[in-house]
Amino acid sequence: MESERHVLVIFPHPDDEAFGVSGTIATLIKNGTPVTYACLTLGQMGRNLGNPPFATRETLPLIRKKELQDAAAAMGIKDLRMLGFHDKTVEFEDEEKLADLFSEMIAELNPSLVITFYPGYSVHPDHEATGRAVIRSIGRLDKSVRPKVHCVAFSNNCEEELGKPDIVHDISAVAEQKLATMRAHRSQTALFMEDMENRAAAKDPETLDRLHFERFWTYQWND
């Protein structure tokens, strides 16, 4: 994995980083790269309230905030920024104003790499809105000074239209940190983490692939 000057990760929800990016983040930090994680919401509208319920809509944001902080600690992130937007409303925010916010962060941090969702290929409306605003903010910069943009994509048509991932990181050396990051988001992951870990212990190939490799597409600019 290349060394970077600074990496800025921008996702809308707590746990968006856990499954496809946490091993990459942990590896970058272990190699001495500073990482800033900007999370737009606290996942207030998360589906899992427990059965029997362990949370209400009023208490879930506090629970998920603590889980996000625990996940950041598991990856080694020191600069976690919670931006205060409401879950499932990012798609209704003014895209230009969102881009302004991200432009300010990019100007402050001067990252050599930004990680976000690939617009058009990330399914959830908040994912799409976040990715579009990130790309808008970076697209304002002259090509000569733009940071690289590595995108997460998982729609059914992403490989058909984008091709195979441009970047595949083997993060098996930090797989335990990745698992710890997923466990940290316990309100949303507890129901399936035990099964996943059992599958990993049994050397299930699909589970090990998911745990040990993280895939990204480089954003393709049209200019």
Image (cartoon, rainbow, N blue to C red):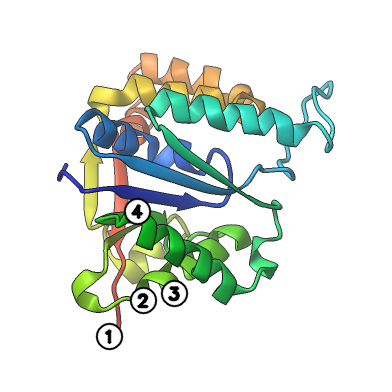
C-alpha distance separating marks 3 and 4: 17 Å
C-alpha distance separating marks 2 and 4: 17 Å
**Measured from the top left, where is residue 23 in percent x and y?**
33, 33
Check contact, mark 1 vs mark 2: CB within 8 A: yes
**Measured from the top left, where is residue 18 in percent x and y?**
46, 36
The crowd level at tag 3 (other Cα within 10 Å; few <14, some 14-19, many 20+) is some
> Which badge, 1 or 2, comes first in the chain's sequence?
2
- Residue 95 lies in quadrant: bottom right
Q: Amino acid at mark 3?
A: Arg
Which residue is drawn at the image coordinates 80% and 31% (left, top)? 59
Q: Amino acid at mark 2?
A: Gly
Query: Which residue occupies the foreground of this view, 28 or 161?
Result: 28
Above or below for 183 versus 59: above
Q: Amino acid at mark 4?
A: Leu
Check contact, mark 2 vs mark 3: CB within 8 A: yes
Q: Amino acid at mark 1?
A: Asp
Q: Would you name the residue on which mark 4 appears?
A: 109
Q: Would you name the residue on which mark 2 appears?
A: 139
C-alpha distance separating marks 1 and 4: 24 Å
SS for callout 4: helix
Q: Would you name the residue on which mark 1 appears?
A: 223
Q: Is residue 69 toward the left or the right of residue 119 in the image?
A: right
Query: Mark on residue 136?
Result: 3
Which part of the image, by quadrant, shows the C terminus?
bottom left
> Which badge, 2 or 4, comes first in the chain's sequence?
4
Above or below for 182 versus 113: above
Query: Which residue occupies the foreground of this view, 20 or 99?
Result: 99
- Residue 178 lies in quadrant: top left
Which part of the image, by quadrant, shows the N terminus?
top left
